[in-house]
Image (cartoon, rainbow, N blue to C red):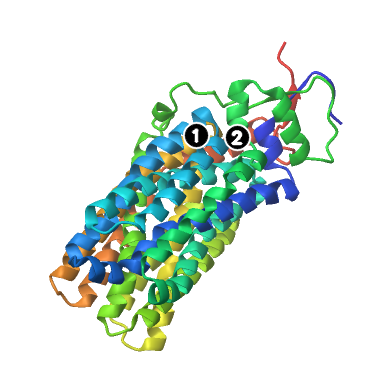
Amino acid sequence: MQQAGKQVDIHALAGHSRFNGFHGLVLWWCVLILVIDGYDLAVVGAALPSIMKDMGVDATSAGVMAGSALFGTMLGAIFLGTLADRIGRPRMIAVCVALFSVFTALTGLATEPIGFSVARFIAGLGIGGVLPIVTAQMGEFAPAKLRTRLVTMVFAGYSVGGILVALTAKQLIESHGWQWVFYVAGLPVLLIPLILKTMPESLSFLLKQGDQRQLGEIAARLAPDQPKAAGTVYVGASTERLYDAPVRTLFDAGRAFSTVMIWVAFMTGLFMVYALNSWLTKLMAMTGYSLGSALNFVIVFNVGAIVGAIGGGLLSDKFNIKHVLVAFYVVGAASLAALAYTKSTGLLFVAVFVVGASTLGTQLLAYAYAGDFYPPAVRSTGVGFASGIGRIGAIAAPILIGWLVSLSLPIEQNFMAIALAGVIGAAAVSFVNQSRAASTQARAARAATGEVGRVDGAIRPASK
């Protein structure tokens, strides 16, 4: 029973809450937003063969066109993800949805490479910006025992978006032209009023604002059966400061080297993902498969990614998430190498499934790992910078693979180039100092104060 004058650690209350309808609402919005986001990003890869033919561009130019959105995602992840910690996450999510919906639809109006690239760049700002924000949002409200699982479920929505592209692209392109796969992407802008009305504000943002009324309302929804006393004050963790310079804090408390290693891991993971997102359809077409058959590989790739993301989340809730992530990078590299030399169609589908689980699935797990590493007050900033800097790999991938395709090298060499990134990613994660992770330090703090087994020190006497 709570007593008057008590302080309640709102983050601990969220961590020890039981999954209920409130958590389901946050999960629903985060998944749906990433379904849309995944569609908007994957749509270029599905339409690329038709775009190349219609605009008369070669593989190198097509790689640059595909990469223009990725340059936008880099800037969006860094600046919009960071800005969300300052102006509030629901507002910034609405801005991102508006950007990627409107400008993906406008891409369908492009008739030449420059106009296409400009529209994709602006859409990319929203695509990249929303990823770290929904990661931080789900991670902040999720019960601690389910956190990794729920965050990876959110990112499974990204793969569902890729599947929607593959399922609809063939029919739309053949019946109406490649432009229509872009036009339909404008519909989600209609969801913005609902997002602003129903998406809860970040706990860390409300703490900075001193908004005890909203904190109390959210606390009641997080733990509806826990009694509340008049005069209860909601606070952050005792070790958490409400930072004025959140970017600098990514390098505080011995996190500097680990932050750089997380950035390297994101660069290599995103290199694998976007190399395949942009060129898998074309690479499979180069081996003799029709557009429809090549898109079937895209479906299998994304189904594998969903299985990998959810499976990785389950494993990470049971084992050390760092070790799980290293294993996923290694399997990704090995499966890409196997894909390079697999000739049987049946075995190719199996290989593509494993590649999806261990490349896109790996990157989705990496977002959960980054969210676990940084403190709540700078979680959007930490994941945003990792995602933004990591986009260097995403930008390089379609351009590099496009250049390799233009050289008419054996297709095996394209896949081996992508596999090398997985080896580097595994090494980078291995060098991260897990003792500096926010989750590790929180457990150590609870052990030091004898709070293991209770509600994470959620309630403590008010300061005198």
**Residue under label 2:** 202
Judge left or right: residue 434 versus residue 456: left
Label 1: element kind: helix
Residues packed near mark 1 inside 10 Å, few (<14), some (14 to 19) or many (20 plus): many
Q: Is residue 407 above or below residue 123?
A: below
Percent x, y for residue 90? 57, 38
**Residue under label 1:** 84
Which image quarter holds the C terminus? top right
Q: Residue at x 47, y 57 (%)?
A: 185
Which sits in the foreground, 425 or 41?
41
Residue closest to the far left:
407
Amino acid type of the residue that numbered disc 2 sits on in the rendered structure: Ser
Residues packed near mark 2 inside 10 Å, few (<14), some (14 to 19) or many (20 plus): many
Q: Is residue 355 above or below residue 135?
A: below
CA distance separating discs 1 and 2: 9 Å
Amino acid type of the residue that numbered disc 1 sits on in the rendered structure: Ala
Which sits in the foreground, 106 or 142?
106
Q: Is residue 56 above or below residue 448?
A: below
Label 2: element kind: loop
Residue closest to the far top:
464
Which sits in the foreground, 39 or 173?
173
Report whether residue 325 is seen.
no
Which image quarter holds the N terminus? top right
Q: Quadrant of residue 10?
A: top right
The reply to whether dot 1 and dot 2 touch (C-beta < 8 Å) is: yes
Percent x, y for residue 340? 28, 77
Q: Residue at x 42, y 55 (%)?
A: 105
Q: Which mark is residue 42?
A: none
Report whether residue 199 is seen.
yes
Labels 1 and 2: the sequence-earlier one: 1
Percent x, y for residue 304? 48, 70
